[in-house]
Image (cartoon, helix red, strand yellow):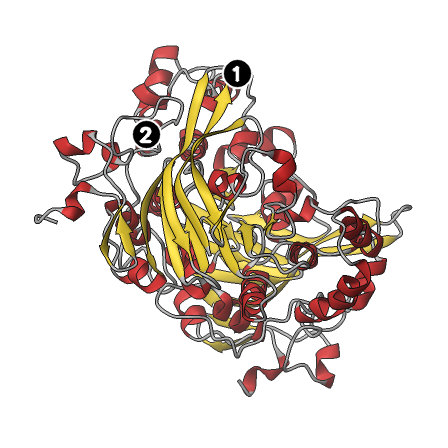
Amino acid sequence: MLQVENLTVYYQTLKGQVRALENASFTLADGEIMGLAGESGCGKTTLGHSLIHLSPPMTHIGGRVLLNGQELPLTDMQKMDAYRFNEISIIPQYAMNALNPIRKIGPMTEELLRAKKADVRTVMAALKDRLEMVKLPQEVLNLYPIELSGGMKQRMVMVLSTLLDPELLIADEITSALDVASQKAVAEMLVEFRNQHCCNSVIFITHDISILYQIADSILIMYAGQLAEKGSTETIIRNPRHPYTRMLISALPEIGVRYSEKRLTGIPGKTPLLLHPPQGCRFRERCPLAFEKCAEVPPFVEIEPGHSVACWKEGSADA
Amino acid sequence: MLKFEHVSKIYKTGTFGGKELHAVNDVSFEIPDGEVVSLIGESGSGKSTIGKMILRLIGITRGTIELDGVNVGALKGSELKEYYRKVQGVFQDPFSSYNPIFKADRIFQVIHDEFYPQVSAAAWTEKVETALKDGGLNPEHVLHKYPHQLSGGQLQRFLIARALLLDIKFLVADEIISMLDASTRIDVLNLLADLKTRGLSILFITHDLSLANYISEQAVILYRGCVAERGITEKIFNRPLHPYTRMLIASVPRLDRKWDTEISVETKATPLGALNGCVYAGRCPLAFEKCKQRPPEVEVEPGHFVACWKVEEI
């Protein structure tokens, strides 16, 4: 189980600090697939990366992360190395380019395992089963990455990332570049991996909420570096409480909804720059419910078991 | 009306150009005035190639594209320039559509110099502001800025405003919302829908079925350069008949329903070269002997065409 407590990460730039992740606190249960959603620049990738590779220009400002009760040495690159790939693993965005183009996939995998001092022989044997799980033929091990299609590469990286059965798997936008059919296949395979204990908990980063509804157990919505709302998938989709979550979900065109019958609306305004973010709730400027109190940062509070919201209108009676 | 008649695009590939790649294979359909037609397909289906052929960015190998009876492929010189007054395109990545060294509004100046040199500067400024307002932008907020100072949604609307300045009849919109955020994409989509009321026709190229369903009157489902199914959007979405369309619609993630895990998604690629037969046969669960021949397009109900041998049984 993963506990994140008040994690704050800024980017150090020449112009000053970009406040990309502010006071994030949440827990992830064993076997839980948590969807992490938000628009570009909301800090979702920053959050994912800070759990595995917190390197400059990312700067750890405060907070801690516990994996199964043990605090992670987030800022110590050397000590974190013992956790990476073994305990915490990532399927990066653009997994298409994550494979070494001049090595065949089989030898590349062996080198990777040797570098991580894993038991090469047993893991390579297990690799065969994993390939079967994602419906890749054994022959891929004798191919160069360029000989694989985008969807095949995506599945290959998925297999590699989970070879050592990590406790935490971070999947960063793994379905975004795929067409709907491959999207469904990859998402369902990820669930299968979890069910077969190839990985324990999963953080699934995406901008596509409708995919999360299909596979996630819980959803965490972020806006401009702040946590907005977390709850079970059903709660977030059917009964969202944060104004941003509500507007985001109502802006999604669903199959069956047609322009001529029902005109959807977007969210007016644009996301604030995080170099000098507005004081208080960062959604304030675009929020139809904003009032004076929103000049203070709303706390991320649990309003019912397993459902937390950061909004002043929620804790009070006039919600 | 824009009319496609048996249009094909063949690329020469291989070291000596000895191999052929049929990017678009004998495609016929029509886009009536004032309608939005969605062109739906996965990557490699040839959907962008079709858009580029309309814009004359690449040549047409076989067949003809006609706009109001005029053969687009044969236009030259000043005729072609007149054609671009009527037909324009907007593409997927708004940031690479601009030169980052110049201010974003330079695109309007270029139109002024090229197409309307007789219009005075003052009158032109007014025209630009009207076009921006029509595009849902506030001119004061967006003029005199560099591309990096504007958001993707704003840049995309800039390009639409640029097209509006030319009094266009036809817009090719190639994946124009896929790079925008969920909160702004619907506004750009609504803007496109509003342009229809001006009599504009739009070819809306996308891989997202729910977007296509939201905006278009007609849809064309493309697979490997061939039309699998086409016709009135509602009919296709309510009663998909081609096995490929069915698989696609079942794969769309929805908020009102979970995926049917029973419908298997075959992701393996079709072996190339099955040109004479149905291009989907290699992935199709219903494939049988006859699929070695190319299935003809059949009108199964008024305004609903399907190219599949098994269509009678479905």
For the point 54% across and 32% down, the residue is B82
For the point 46% across and 71% down, the residue is B259
Res. B118 image quadrant: top left
Depth check, front residue: A206 or A315: A315
Depth check, front residue: B21 or A137: A137
Question: Which mark, residue B63?
Answer: none
Same chain assignment for discs 1 and 2: yes
State whether residue B53 is above or below residue A236: above
Q: Residue furthest top?
A: B121
Which residue type does callout 2 highlight?
Leu
Name the element at disc 1.
loop
Q: Which residue is mark 1?
A: B102
Q: Is residue B280 left or right of residue B135?
A: right
Crowding at dot 2, Cα within 10 Å, few <14 / some 14-19 / many 20+, comes out as some
Residue B119 percent across, percent down from the top left? 40, 16
Residue B147 percent across, percent down from the top left? 48, 23
Crowding at dot 1, Cα within 10 Å, few <14 / some 14-19 / many 20+, comes out as few
State whether residue A317 is above or below residue B78: below
Q: Which residue is mark 2?
A: B137
For the point 35% across and 53% down, the residue is A252
